[in-house]
């Protein structure tokens, strides 16, 4: 019974510590005192003082003298110690390696993107390239690499996030690849691994006070197509973390060939790879989507039906996301949307004609402007797990 009581106390202490950190993070732009925290959490001042003391010993928070509002001593406010440690996010997709470093105030301290010129996705080469990017970024931004204590990795495909394994990634040609172990060997820090779209959703919402606890669907359109969904700030994963793999849902029976080897997948119709392949099938071989867009803006007639078909299919995907997940926010991002915003705008116009207006009353649709959502999200998740480790050990 004593062991059970001790376990219960440990869980209670952990939950209370997390709650205090969350309150301080939420109020980072407004000074907050011990008394304020106690009122918000409906806990005794003695308990809050005990928790604050332990968090200060871990260097996670600090106190600052506040200006006096009247007669008497200045108050003491509590805030996150943004320099306690840094966390690293590393994103891998078919076209880019992306890197992001965030501090404990959830602010991006540095970031970079490296364009992959070849389709060589050997994990040793990618990790070596990633470490070189990390050291160069630290040098450029004047960051001490020893302050980076943890690392998150996002990659496309089916990921066993509990064990850090890429189970299946047709885009990268990976199967049952232990990315986490390899990264820990090379970077020498604890590593977590997750699906790129889920991490992009985290990266798109973790700094937003409106969205980080809301119902949000994130649709990413780039080299592949995927969706991530949160309800009340909680990620929807499914039984094997494959929830949201809509890129390989059936869009047209016996339709276009997909990179996964099947026919008719949505990815074959709205991803960059799918569109490039379709151009070649129609007798207009191109290497990248930007060649199609250049020809389109140059007035080449063969591009018009392809662009029209692409944006119509994108619009149908928007509708399907709203009908399927019914979230308050629909975020649309990915390299294709960021690089070619005109495609998003054309698709949005067609979407308004397709959607049943009764389903579109309260939904907020936003285009994500950043390419680095996946790396930011991975860095944030790594940070959260590292703090959990500090609180439990």
Image: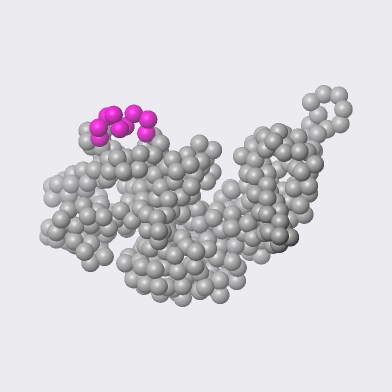
Could you say which quadrant of the image residue 265 lies in?
bottom left
What secondary structure predominates along the stretch shown in magenta? loop
Q: Quadrant of the N terminus?
A: bottom right
Q: Residue furthest top?
A: 70
Q: Residue furthest right?
A: 72
**Image position, residue 212 (x, y; %):** 51, 42
Q: Is residue 143 left or right of residue 231?
A: right
Q: Is residue 53 left or right of residue 376?
A: right
Residue at image location 35% in from the left, 66% down from the top: 169
**Image position, residue 343 (x, y; %):** 28, 44
Residue at image location 21% in from the left, 52% down from the top: 251
User: Exactly how many numbered labels are in the figure?
Assistant: 0
* Residue 34 drawn above or below residue 248: above
Foreground residue among 51 and 349: 51
Q: Is residue 329 left or right of residue 285?
A: right
Q: Is residue 287 left or right of residue 69?
A: left
Residue at image location 48% in from the left, 47% down from the top: 234
Q: What colouring does the structure picture have?
A: one colour
* Residue 359 drawn above or below residue 152: above
Residue bounds of the magenta highlight: 355-363
Magenta stretch: residue 392 in it? no
Could you say which quadrant of the image residue 258 lies in?
bottom left
């Amino acid at each position: 019974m004593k062991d059970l009581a001790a376990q219960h106390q440990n869980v209670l202490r952990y939950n209370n510590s997390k709650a205090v950190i969350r309150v301080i993070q939420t109020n980072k732009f407004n000074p907050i005192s011990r008394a304020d925290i106690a009122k918000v959490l409906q806990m005794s001042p003695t308990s809050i003082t005990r928790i604050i003391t332990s968090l200060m010993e871990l260097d996670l928070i600090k106190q600052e003298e506040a200006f006096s509002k009247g007669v008497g001593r200045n108050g003491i406010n509590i805030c996150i110690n943004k320099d306690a440690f840094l966390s690293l996010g590393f994103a891998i997709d078919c076209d880019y390696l992306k890197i992001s470093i965030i501090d404990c105030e959830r602010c991006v301290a540095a970031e970079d993107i490296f364009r992959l010129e070849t389709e060589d996705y050997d994990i040793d080469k990618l990790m070596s390239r990633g470490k070189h990017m990390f050291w160069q970024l630290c040098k450029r931004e004047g960051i001490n690499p020893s302050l980076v204590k943890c690392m998150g990795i996002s990659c496309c495909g089916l990921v066993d996030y509990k064990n850090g394994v890429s189970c299946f990634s047709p885009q990268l040609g990976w199967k049952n690849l232990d990315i986490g172990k390899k990264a820990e060997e090379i970077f020498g820090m604890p590593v977590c691994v997750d699906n790129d779209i889920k991490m992009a959703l985290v990266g798109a919402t973790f700094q937003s006070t409106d969205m980080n606890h809301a119902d949000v669907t994130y649709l990413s359109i780039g080299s592949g197509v995927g969706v991530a969904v949160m309800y009340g700030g909680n990620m929807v994963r499914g039984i094997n973390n494959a929830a949201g793999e809509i890129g390989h849902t059936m869009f047209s029976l016996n339709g276009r060939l997909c990179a996964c080897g099947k026919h008719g997948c949505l990815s074959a119709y709205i991803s960059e790879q799918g569109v490039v392949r379709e151009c070649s099938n129609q007798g207009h071989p191109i290497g990248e989507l930007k060649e199609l867009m250049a020809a389109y803006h140059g007035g080449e007639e063969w591009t018009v039906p392809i662009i029209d078909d692409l944006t119509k299919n994108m619009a149908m995907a928007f509708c399907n996301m709203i009908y399927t997940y019914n979230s308050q926010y629909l975020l649309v991002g990915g390299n294709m949307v960021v690089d070619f915003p005109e495609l998003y705008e054309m698709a949005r116009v067609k979407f308004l004609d397709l959607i049943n207006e009764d389903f579109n009353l309260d939904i907020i649709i936003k285009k994500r402007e950043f390419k680095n959502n996946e790396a930011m999200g991975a860095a944030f998740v790594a940070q959260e797990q590292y703090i959990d480790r500090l609180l439990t050990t």
